[in-house]
Amino acid sequence: MTQEILRIVIIAVPIIIAITFHEAAHGYVARVFGDDTATRLGRVTFNPLKHIDPFGTIILPALLLLSHAGFVFGYAKPVPVNFASLNNPKRDMIWVSAAGPGTNLLLAVASAVLLWIAVRAGVNTNGIVAALLAVSIQINLVLAVLNMLPLPPLDGGRVLTGLLPRGLAEPFAKIEPYGFFIIIAALLVLPYIGEKIGTNLDIFSWLVARPVEWMMNAIFHLIG
């Protein structure tokens, strides 16, 4: 039981840090481009309690972890952004949306550098510090890649909305109310159906796990 609790802690701490920085980045960049909604509501902060969603941040990842689902998925309370208040709503939406995944990418690189320093300083590679940093790299890369998938309400969907011509952006944005259900179906339902019919329908592996593996290899190659 102690090992299981330690395993949960090693995964939970990087997740909480990753989502806290992710959401705070959205609010900060929104403020830079003219919308102070998140600032007024106290969401431009590194206090994780302001961003944690009880189900999405704690219960869902814990259930996936304890059920050995093969991946960990979670989410925080979205930072409120009034896109109409941005200086240039269509253009600035791109920067605000990309800020979260971009921050996760920076955290992954920072964690890799810290791991490199720790290993060369003689830290036990099988110890908790090395494990926390290694998990941080993976969690942040997963969040960066997953959130940049071009489907609203994911950040990638909003980036694509900002890039599309208005005539295409408006109907595309209407997918957003159904986006979460599409994501859950893609991550949980399709693999189950594929297993039953003998076909690999693990979209998470195709669209997220493989790019994350490639990025992890690239980061470790760069830092030696």
Image: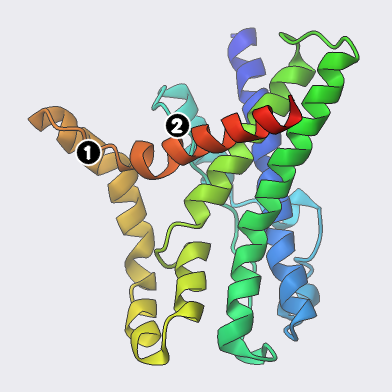
The answer to whether one can see residue 80 in this image is: no
Quadrant of the frame with the N terminus: top right
Give the vertical position of 175 relative to 104 (above or below). Answer: below
Which tag, 1 or 2, sits closer to the chain's start? 2
How many numbered callouts?
Answer: 2
At 74% from the left and 72% from the top, the residue drawn is: 29
Q: Please give left or right for residue 28 compared with residue 66 in the image.
A: right
**Horizontal arrangement in the rendering, residue 133 relative to residue 68 (left or right):** right
Q: Determine the residue positioned at 80% across, 52% down.
A: 47
- For label 1, the SS is loop
Q: Position of residue 84 (x, y in %)?
A: 60, 91
**Residue in front for this viewpoint, 1 or 159:** 159
Amino acid found under the numbered disc labelled 1? Leu
Q: What x and y, as percent, mark residue 200?
A: 20, 33
> Is 64 above or below relative to 158?
above
**For the residue marked with disc 2, what is the amino acid?**
Phe
Give me the residue at 49% from left, 72% from top.
158
Q: Give coordinates of residue 53: x percent, y percent.
A: 59, 52
**Mark 1 neighbour density, 10 Å: few (under 14) some (14–19) many (20 or more):** some
On the question of residue 38 being in view, the answer is yes
Q: How far apart are marks 1 and 2 (CA)?
A: 15 Å
Q: Which mark is residue 201?
A: 1
Residue that carries the numbered disc 2 in the rendered image: 71
The label shown at residue 2 is none
Give the vertical position of 192 relative to 121 (above or below): below
Q: For the point 74% across and 61% down, which residue is it?
A: 24
Q: In this view, does 199 lie to the left or right of 188?
A: left
Q: In which quarter of the image is residue 209?
A: top left
Q: Which quadrant does the C terminus fall into?
A: top right
